[in-house]
Amino acid sequence: MCVVVTELADGDGSTLVQSLRRRGAQRVVVLTRRASRIELGVLLQGGVRGAVASSTAATLARTPAAAPPMPPLPELTNRELSVLRLVAQGRSNRLIGEDLGLSALTVKSHLARISRKFGTGDRAHLVAMSYRGGLLD
């Protein structure tokens, strides 16, 4: 789903995230003409898949609502981290397997386990959560 908002004023990001959660909206991308970097961060930390602003406000008119803290990420094995790093590079299961000396089916099993731990089967979401949570550089 793509949500288009003319402008995100300070504090609007958390309100929008709460509204989307109440409606059960998943896989949402927000497009706006103007928003502060903090508001874009609030959207991403709130679970929005992507947020794009044609211009970002450098100054804030008022104190923004605190972004909800990101829940701690589950612990991954070294092999799962290796697989996730290669997923982040855009590699297919077959190419990941070739790099790590595994079959594509084994890579698929690792990804299934990672997906269960993270609570999502979407590769892009796994990577985004990993970067936000500091698992990947």
Image: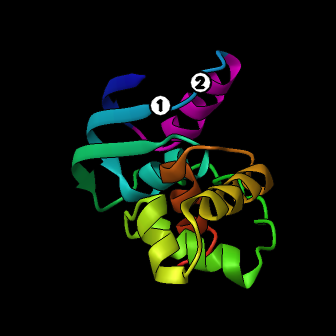
Residue 38 falls left or right of residue 107:
left
Q: Position of residue 101 (x, y in %)?
A: 55, 81
For the residue labelled by badge 2, is the local secondary structure a helix, a strand or a loop? helix
Q: Residues within 10 Å of mark 1 (few under 14, many from 20)?
A: some
Q: Nearer the viewer, mark 1 or mark 2?
A: 1
Residue marked by disc 1: 28
Q: Is residue 1 above or below residue 27?
A: above
Identify the amino acid type marked 1. Val
Residue 60 falls left or right of residue 71:
left
Give me the residue at 29% from left, 62% from top. 58
Q: Is residue 53 above or below residue 3?
A: below
In the drawing, what numbered circle is on residue 62? none
Identify the amino acid type marked 2. Leu
Q: Is residue 59 above or below residue 136?
A: above
Q: Nearer the viewer, residue 10 or 23?
A: 23
What is the basis of the colouring in this image?
A: rainbow
Q: Are marks 1 and 2 in contact (CB under 8 Å)?
A: yes
Q: Position of residue 2 (x, y in %)?
A: 37, 25
Q: Main secondary structure of the magenta part?
A: helix
Q: Nearer the viewer, residue 110 or 60?
A: 110
Is residue 116 at all visible to an observer of this figure? yes
Q: Position of residue 42 (x, y in %)?
A: 54, 50
Q: Nearer the viewer, residue 85 or 95?
A: 95
Q: Position of residue 60 (x, y in %)?
A: 39, 56
Give me the residue at 62% from left, 57% from top. 105
Q: What residue range appears in magenta?
A: 9-22
In the drawing, what numbered circle is on residue 20? 2
Q: Residues within 10 Å of mark 2 (few under 14, many from 20)?
A: some
